[in-house]
Image: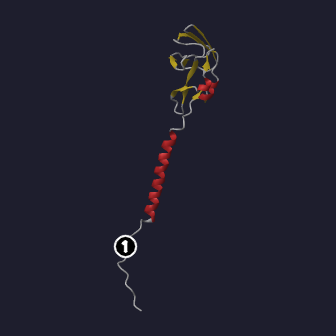
Amino acid sequence: MTKKKSGAMNKKQAISPVITTVLLVLLAVILAAIIFIWARNFVKETLIKSGESIDKSCDRISIQASISGQELMITNTGQVAIYNIKVYNSGSSGDSDSFLINQSLSPGQSFVKNVPGIASGSQLAFVLLGTNKNNQINEFPCPKSTWKTLA
């Protein structure tokens, strides 16, 4: 029998297993970094006020508020210092105006302020100050569930 000669020898070489492993590890690291950067936007940094999560401090806000004409009178009857207050006035047409009252309110402290358009049904939103893990002071707007409605 005669042997048939095969055509030219196939000289293609595959990627070395070491190089393949390095490329796969590099790809996994890059994907992990992308996912970490993307997910970081969804996680809020925890702020601390008086040794507890600032969310709990919002739940403990206690005030007495009343209106007389365009004057808003507020007394902080709780133990949580309020950094700022935002007033949301609802108009008869469904639109709303908001006013930031640049007034901090320590426990036991009161103030009277002229707020245009304030009326029964207006809502008070509170802003507290808290510290993050790096001891930086940041503002924290309390969630809508803790807002107070004026009677």
Question: Which residue in the rendered view is the most extreme toward the bottom?
Answer: 1
Residue shown at 64%/23% (left/top)? Answer: 60
- Does the image show residue 105? yes
Q: Establish if 102 lies above or below 26.
A: above
Q: Is residue 19 left or right of residue 112?
A: left
Residue shown at 57%/21% (left/top)? Answer: 125
Task: Give 54 or 131, whichever is nearer the viewer.
Answer: 54
Q: Position of residue 117 (x, y in %)?
A: 53, 12
Question: Which residue in the rendered view is the most extreme toward the top?
Answer: 69
Task: Give 4 or 35, whichever is nearer the viewer.
Answer: 4
Q: Position of residue 87 (x, y in %)?
A: 54, 18
In terms of image quadrants, where is residue 77?
A: top right
Q: Position of residue 141 (x, y in %)?
A: 55, 25
Q: Which residue is mark 1?
A: 11
- Which amino acid, by three-letter code, is at mark 1? Lys
For the C terminus, which image quadrant? top right
Residue shown at 48%/53% (left/top)? Answer: 28
In terms of image quadrants, where is residue 54?
A: top right
Q: Is residue 25 left or right of residue 9?
A: right
In terms of image quadrants, where is residue 12?
A: bottom left
Q: Is residue 6 left or right of residue 146?
A: left
Disc 1 is placed on an element classified as loop
Task: Give 144 or 14, whichever is nearer the viewer.
Answer: 144
For the N terminus, which image quadrant? bottom left
Q: Establish if 20 lies above or below 77.
A: below
Q: Position of residue 121 (x, y in %)?
A: 60, 16
Q: Residues within 10 Å of mark 1 (few under 14, many from 20)?
A: few
Question: Which residue in the rendered view is the most extreme toward the left?
Answer: 8
